[in-house]
Image (cartoon, rainbow, N blue to C red):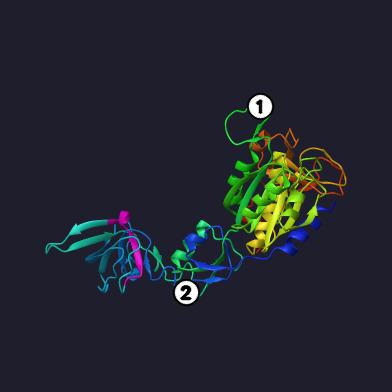
Amino acid sequence: MITYSEALEQIVAALKPAAPVTVGPGAALGAGLGKPVASRLNVPDFDNAAMDGIAVRAADVAQAAAGRPVTLRVIGVAPAGHRSEQNVDAGQAVEIMTGAPMPPGADTVIPVERVEWREADGGDKLALVEMATERGRNVRRAGEDFCAGDQLLAAGNVLSPEAVMNLAAGGVDEVVAVLPPAVAVITTGSELAASGAPTGTGKIRDSNGPYLAAGLAPMGGALVGMHSAADEPDALAAAMTAAAAGAQLVLTTGGVSAGKFDCVPAAVVAAGGEVLFHKVAIRPGKPMLFAALPDDRWLLGLPGNPVAVAVGLRFFVAPALRVLRGLAPEQALPARSSHAIRKRPDLRFFGKASATVSAAGQLEVALLPGQESFRVRPLLAANCWAIVAEDRDEVAPGELIEIAPLYPTSFLQTS
């Protein structure tokens, strides 16, 4: 039996990042960038109005004050999306809309709420202003957000919605990215029922398959197939071969313990693969298995108990997917335990937990009742996993331990 750290080292050493592809930013949402990305445009691309109002020269309204308005002649209208060719000279103004390019000569925008409108005897429109303002007020300058050539995202960054927004603004229509790896799931066990209420039949509902199908995307994987297999090596080997045909990573649930019908190790060999490790010093999830399959495909064998499956997904599958996506390892967070924790000293413990921020601004974590690996209801109240290392058998209240959120988040990524 190996330690958790040793298991991760083997996974990282075996897996290699997938080849990057060139796609539109929207198609790469959730993917890791294979190359850094720079803006093609200044953002904003030109000086423009930050609000509706009138574009003026600041010098013309320098003496304006309440009860002493400055009167300006309005010479035109500048709507958004159109560049005005009208030059604003002394004593003039242009009515302007938010986002419209600043007309030549104007350097300031007076908000429409601070303008009174009049009509001159000749029919000209006049604007009365009772506020002085500094040059450049209410104007978005070209390149004020970022400039053409500025790096927006580094290689390894994950394409988030806000990243897509920045790339679109910067005129970037293609990125080189490593797309989420293809993952297939095989649920094993003749006792599993996919639907209905199998009361009195000796069967149980399959909760692991639906959980993995729902949880893969938040972990960075793309589900490409769901399979089921009976507790029989040849049938399971055939399912592994079929699943691996379209997936980089195959996940199995159940069949990795030492029982008579736990046949995943034998099925790996029957499918032409090799078991790289089997059993890890953790709780829950000790029977975890990692194997190489033919044609550079990989298999993670998760135990059958549902919380062990959750631990396997979070702490084995998620790191494997990060390697395949070319991302840096995830970093856990320190938190103070709100109460005592006792465990076996030779096993790393992953506990269903809830983290909060104390009045003093410190991150605190509490284990939830119902830590048995068959109890799934506590996961509804959990927002993180509490992690206690192998070399500790006891944690006193107030001592630091590590936590990881239920699903990876951006603030846990290294740059």
Q: Give the range drawn in magenta.
A: 106-115
Q: Please tell me how many numbered marks the rendered image carries.
A: 2
Q: Looking at the picture, how far across and down is residue 54, in whole percent? A: 29, 62
* In the depicted structure, whether residue 109 falls above or below residue 400: below
Q: Which amino acid does label 2 sit on?
A: Ala
Q: Which of the two discs, 1 and 2, sits closer to the camera?
A: 1
Task: Return the x and y of residue 366 as percentages of the image width and height.
Answer: 73, 39
Which quadrant of the view contains residue 143? Answer: bottom left
Kind of residue sitting beneath label 1: Thr
Q: Residue 148 carries which label?
A: 2
* Residue 262 sits in quarter: top right
For mark 1, give the secondary structure.
loop
Is 114 colored magenta in this rendering?
yes
Image x and y of residue 411, in percent: 63, 55
Q: Which residue is drawn at 61% across and 50% down?
A: 216
Q: Which of 281 and 291 is in front in this view?
A: 291
- Locate residue 273, reporting x and y percent: 73, 58
Q: Name the residue under label 1.
A: 201
Q: Is mark 2 on a helix, strand or loop?
A: loop
